[in-house]
Amino acid sequence: MNYPRIILKKGRDAALRRGHPWVFSGALASVEGKLEPGDIVLAADATGRNLGLGFFNTGDIAFRLLTDNPAARIDAGFWRRRIEWALALRRQVVPPETDAFRLVNAEGDGMPGLVVDRYGDYLVFSIGTAGIEKWRETLIGLMVESVGPVGIYERSEGRSRQLEGLAERICPVVGEIPETAEITENGLRFVVDLITGQKTGFFLDQRLNREIVGALSREAAVLNCFSYTGAFSVYAVRGGAKRVVSVEASAATNEIACRNLVRNGLSPENHPMLTANVFDYIRETEEVFDVIILDPPAFAKSRKDLARAARGYKEINLQAARRLREGGLLATFSCSNPIDPELFEKIVLGAVRDAGKTAQVLRLLGAGPDHPVNLAHPEGRYLKGLLLCLTTP
């Protein structure tokens, strides 16, 4: 098939040759024909050599790579193979007694703009690019064919969709979707709000980190900040924590957190679920903890938010460092895309030093293997985390 072409400026093809899936608008020298957002195009270097096929758009990201094979054909068969590859990977990396995981992780699975999460018998998906939007019906059909879910729900919303010039779409697509579903993760049971919960209902990307923290919680007093529906808390209690304090601003999600404890045969008696502003609570509490978990929502949605976000991360990590006993453990995270791992580490280091402590890095943390990232696309590593041991020098 003959696809239209975009021609890159001289010297602006290096990132694409290395495998980075994006070309920014400033790198374009010319565009052949009249293109619409989401059209399939060939990207070529300044000499006219074709480099790969991808989605065109008129925004800042002008090209999103689908394949570096210029002779490929983008059709239903192409997408079927991509879905099959994604399923095969999950069969390999998702642990037993787990029926909730990320099935498609956008660029990490070669499908830029498509995120699909599986929650037992249900799929929840989001479309963030004009290119995937054009293949929406095909992809829904392939999900039904490949997975056979009882229901599929769409939650296509957020800033990325706005930047692509797409209206939000939040609706059931296949079957009847319950407001909540129950999932299994490493043998633990959790209630998930499929329709109004954060992200697509649950923080699937933290599964591996919950295992790590849970295993380190034996006989510990644990503070779980921004606890949402209490998944870290459940793992900590199962791991033998003597006391877990969960702090979350939403009373409704705290109710679900309590249900999750009880559903797993754990008593909430010694594990309070507090409805409070985390910043206020951690500044004011006098309790000292053995383990503190900081898993806040994204403080920075774009680069213009960087300074404010850095102050937020600095403050919350400073207060956590002050509330840890000598030799205590801090599991701290950022899911803000504009905050890269190096900047996050600098912010946390500044907070630790201001608290008069030093930090040993026990592990670098990130999303689990069902959230693969293209090695050439560091922007895909949105979740950054550190497991630290804090001591007084």
Image (spheres, rainbow, N blue to C red):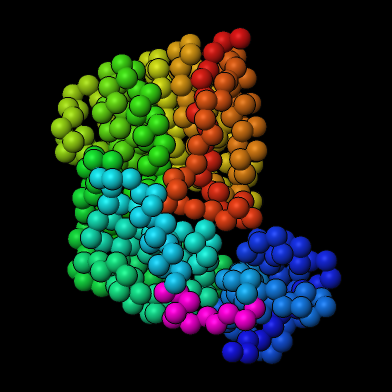
Q: Residue at x 20, y 60 (%)?
A: 178
Residue 210 can be seen, yes or no: yes
Q: Is residue 75 magenta?
A: yes
Q: Which range is magenta?
A: 70-80
Q: Nearer the viewer, residue 282 or 33?
A: 33
Which quadrant holds the C terminus? Answer: top right
User: Quadrant of the image for the N terminus?
Assistant: bottom right
Q: Quadrant of residue 241?
A: top left
User: Where is 223 relative to 177, above or below?
Assistant: above
State the image coordinates of residue 111 (x, y, percent, origin top left).
50, 67
- Residue nearest the viewer, comparing 130 with 318: 130
Identify the residue shown where x is 49% and y is 61%. Answer: 109
> Which residue shows up at 52% across the image and 25% down it?
362
Find residue 65 and report its image quarter. Answer: bottom right
Question: Quick check: 258 above or below 113?
Answer: above
Give left or right: position of 327 versus 236. right
